[in-house]
Image: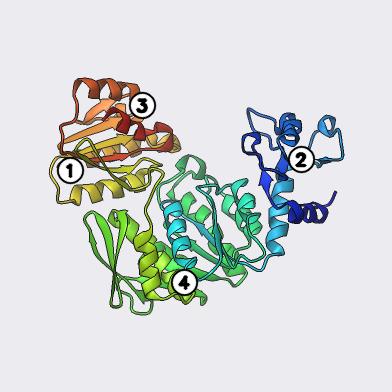
């Protein structure tokens, strides 16, 4: 069966599933494979649970007309996403960067949907599986699709850009993320800039933070760029009024106070403001959208628990985002500041150096107590409380409970799951 024929089936049944635990009636199930699972083995179960067709790539499982045998299920999913995107009228905004992708995506969505029928990547489904799945959520009446693209090695953004074929693009920043895969900060810049290469080659529009010297240098004299800046008059003017704790921005005569903490969220808000203005959304609507957006899923959340005020930013971490979070927390005008930092993953052979730099940074700041948690942080030279594992932290806090009325910053890589601290407090 050709991709065009599979696409006709998709237009009829319109829902794609890749997990038998989330089967919906009349969906098409794609039997993906992974290192520890083979979706072909669950194809019959998908039919029993309500799928209409299943896509498999092992002949022995294709036992009826409801099984569609292909050479490779993943490639078929990707080809279907690309084919569907080509047959949609929606404009696509491609989004990547080292930090802030998901928050920026949600802010852009909040603004854009004030005027347009909008879809966006769900959660952080931004890889070689998530991007085609996002493309397949574009409906006939969708006007704008925001597609987040993540990467941990070279050529990945190039591949995802060729799938999504964005009409517009934005890179949040270039930071020390996924150094194990990219090899160096220069590798990160090269990898993320693959989005720029696609957009410039195809003469598409690019949104940029004109105060970022890397973005400015990369785009040079490229004509189809639209930027924001705090000082460069040739771009859309924005001003950071405050970030103690919430980011407050001045745009023309409007003051916008977000629910996001940290000056590092300033540019995330600015990107959404810029795109809103580009797509002719009024400033009152932009203001309403940003002020109504409340972060969740452990991303820059403000919580209060047992007398503590908590900044929970434990969804992920890398040296750049960790340093920014520490600078922001250190600058807050509050008493009794306590930090919990968890190991940063995917740093390769730079892990020891990067963790020591963060430990040194913490040592220069005026925190009441600092906790460094994880195997990498435990090896650093620091006067902070160093603990090799979360269980060690749990036992320590049982014996040394945090005093009430403390201000806490909790940040670490996803694998550390430091949000579990809330259960201890």
Task: Find residue 210 and report its image quarter.
Answer: bottom left
Disc number at residue 54?
2
Instruction: Depth check: give the residue in front, 417 or 177.
Output: 417
Q: Callout 3: helix, strand or loop?
A: helix
- Dot 3: few (<14), some (14–19), or many (≥20) neighbours within 10 Å? some
Image height of 8 relative to 311, above or below: below
Foreground mark, 2 or 4, reads 2
How far is mark 3 from mark 1, CA to CA? 22 Å
* Left-right relation of 292 to 224: left
SS at mark 1 in the image: loop
> Which residue is label 1 attached to?
365
**Residue appearing at x 83%, y 54% in the figure:** 5
Q: Is residue 114 left or right of residue 64?
A: left
Q: Are marks 3 and 4 in contact (CB under 8 Å)?
A: no
Can the viewer see residue 210?
Answer: no
Q: CA distance from mark 1 to mark 2?
A: 56 Å
Residue 220 marker: 4
Say which of 232 and 406 sits in front: 406
Label annotation for residue 375: 3
Residue 44 vertical position relative to residue 102 in the rendered view, above or below: above
| CA distance for labels 3 and 2 | 43 Å
Tell me the distance, in whole angstroms, between the alpha carbons under discs 4 and 1.
38 Å
């Amino acid at each position: 069966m050709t991709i065009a024929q599979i696409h006709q089936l998709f237009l009829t049944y319109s829902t794609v599933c890749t997990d038998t635990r989330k089967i919906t009636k009349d969906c098409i199930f794609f039997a993906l494979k992974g290192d520890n699972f083979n979706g072909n083995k669950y194809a019959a179960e998908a039919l029993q649970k309500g799928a209409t067709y299943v896509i498999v790539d092992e002949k022995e499982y294709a036992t009826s007309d409801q099984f569609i045998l292909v050479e490779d299920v993943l490639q078929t999913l990707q080809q279907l996403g690309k084919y569907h995107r080509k047959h949609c009228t929606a404009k696509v905004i491609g989004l990547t960067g080292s930090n802030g992708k998901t928050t920026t995506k949600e802010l852009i969505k909040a603004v854009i949907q004030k005027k347009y029928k909008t879809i966006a990547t769900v959660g952080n489904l931004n890889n070689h599986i998530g991007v085609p799945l996002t493309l397949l959520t574009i409906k006939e009446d969708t006007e704008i699709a925001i597609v987040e693209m993540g990467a941990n090695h070279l050529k990945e953004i190039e591949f995802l850009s060729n799938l999504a074929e964005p009409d517009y693009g934005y890179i949040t920043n270039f930071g020390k993320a996924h150094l194990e895969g990219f090899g160096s900060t220069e590798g990160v810049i090269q990898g993320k800039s693959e989005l720029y290469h696609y957009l410039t080659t195809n003469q598409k529009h690019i949104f940029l933070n004109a105060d970022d010297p890397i973005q400015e240098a990369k785009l040079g004299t490229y004509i189809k760029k639209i930027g924001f800046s705090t000082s460069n008059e040739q771009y859309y003017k924005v001003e950071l009024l405050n970030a103690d704790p919430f980011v407050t921005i001045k745009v023309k005569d409007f003051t916008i106070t977000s629910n996001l903490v940290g000056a590092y969220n300033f540019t995330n808000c600015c990107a959404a403001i810029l795109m809103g203005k580009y797509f002719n959304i009024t400033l009152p609507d932009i203001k309403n959208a940003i002020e109504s957006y409340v972060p969740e899923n452990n991303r820059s959340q403000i919580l209060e628990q047992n007398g503590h005020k908590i900044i929970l930013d434990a969804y992920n971490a890398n040296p750049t985002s960790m340093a920014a979070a520490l600078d922001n927390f250190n600058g807050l005008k509050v008493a009794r500041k306590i930090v919990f930092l968890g190991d940063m993953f995917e740093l390769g052979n730079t892990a020891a150096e990067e963790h020591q730099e963060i430990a040194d940074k913490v040592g220069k700041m005026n925190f009441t107590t600092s906790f460094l948690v994880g195997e990498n942080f435990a090896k650093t030279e620091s006067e902070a409380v160093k603990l090799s594992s979360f269980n060690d932290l749990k036992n320590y806090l049982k014996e040394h409970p945090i005093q009430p009325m403390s201000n806490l910053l909790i940040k670490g890589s996803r694998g550390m799951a430091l949000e579990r601290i809330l259960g201890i407090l």
